[in-house]
Image (cartoon, rainbow, N blue to C red):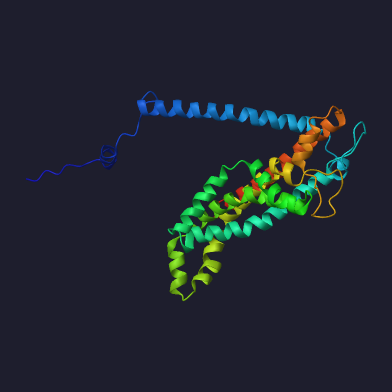
Amino acid sequence: MVVTQTVDPTRAVAAATPDMRHSFFERRTLSNFVLTFFLWILAILAAVPLFSVLYMLIVRGGARINLETLTSLPPAGFMPGGGVGNAIVGTLVMVFLAALISVPFGVLGGVFLGLVAPESKLAGAARFVGQVLTGFPSILAGVFVFGFLVLAMGTYSAIAGGVALAIGMFPTILLTSEQAVRMVPQRMKDAAAGMGCTPFQATWKVTLPTALPGIMTGVMLAVAGAAGNSAPLLFTALFSNYWIESLREPTASLAILIYNFSGMPFPNQIELAWAASLVLVVIVLVFNIVSRLFGAPKL
């Protein structure tokens, strides 16, 4: 006689399923909660100085932001009104010159380091120099450009300021471009070679377009850093109270205007220094946001 035993499927599944219940007071769960809470506290503490500075800029600088401030020339002592228009234009001009110099050489250098000869002695030396330059004091770049360009030209100029800023931008663009090129999947390069593309065609039509978001992220971050850099401009572009008419003349910049006006005993100039600080922070913030947009993963 055969006896058949009926098995409840629900109970069988429940018996086969591991028990996923856990207590909050288990060592793993408790340590995870404590460390997460601790990291949130540290993040909030780190954000307090940032938001306090932003609050002061918005309150004190925002009160002076108007069309006149953004489009007028700086005032003389004891004079009311005025603005920072020439400093905004001068900053953008010198950053644009610096980008014209540093971006082509930085991207080409990144392609060489990441694709052409990544293991060569020349690549190793260039990579080492780029890493050293990332920690290079920016004021020394200004002194260097002053010695070989400002003295040769006989005057401070926007050209000298752009060259000094380009020295600071170059290592950031070089190293980020190298990493962006290295992150391009090897199968894409192999596919281009398999289709009969020359190395130049594969680089131009496959590698660079794929690495473009990472390259642009590095470019935008370098531009944002250059826009707020004041030390090299003290020795190269100096300052001017007038609109820029030639690249071979002293040129105003927001960073130097803030430096000059913040130490003056005139309330109007101090208010303009706060307004210029807010404008400079907004410019840097815009470049950082653009870099994030370029670097965001495409869905």
The residue located at (54%, 57%) in the rendering is 110
- Residue in the picture at 92% in, 31% down: 78
Spot occupied by residue 75 in the image (x, y as percentages of width and height): 89, 38
Q: Residue at x 43, y 62 (%)?
A: 186
The answer to whether residue 44 is above or below residue 91 is: above
Placement of 79 over or under 176, stated as above or below: above
- Residue 11 left/right relative to 269: left
Tell me how many marks there are: 0
92 above or below 260? below
Is 18 in front, or is 148?
Answer: 148
Q: Residue at x 47, y 70 (%)?
A: 192
Q: Answer yes or no: is residue 93 visible.
A: no
Where's the C terminus, which quadrant?
A: bottom right
The reply to whether residue 275 is visible in this rendering is yes
Residue located farthest toward the top when viewing the structure as drawn = 25
Taking the view exactly as shown, the residue that stands out farthest to the bottom is 196
Give residue 283's position: percent from left, percent from top.
72, 44
Residue 1 image position (x, y, % from top left)? 6, 45
* Residue 263 found in image quarter: top right
List the single residue furthest toward the right.
Answer: 79
Q: Is residue 213 left or right of residue 152?
A: left
Q: Relative to 216, is 278 on the left or the right?
A: right
**Which residue is outermost to the left?**
1
Residue 49: image x %, image y %?
A: 64, 28
83 and 244: which is toward the camera? 244
Report the side of 177 relative to 253 (left or right).
Answer: left
Residues 224 and 293: in front is 224
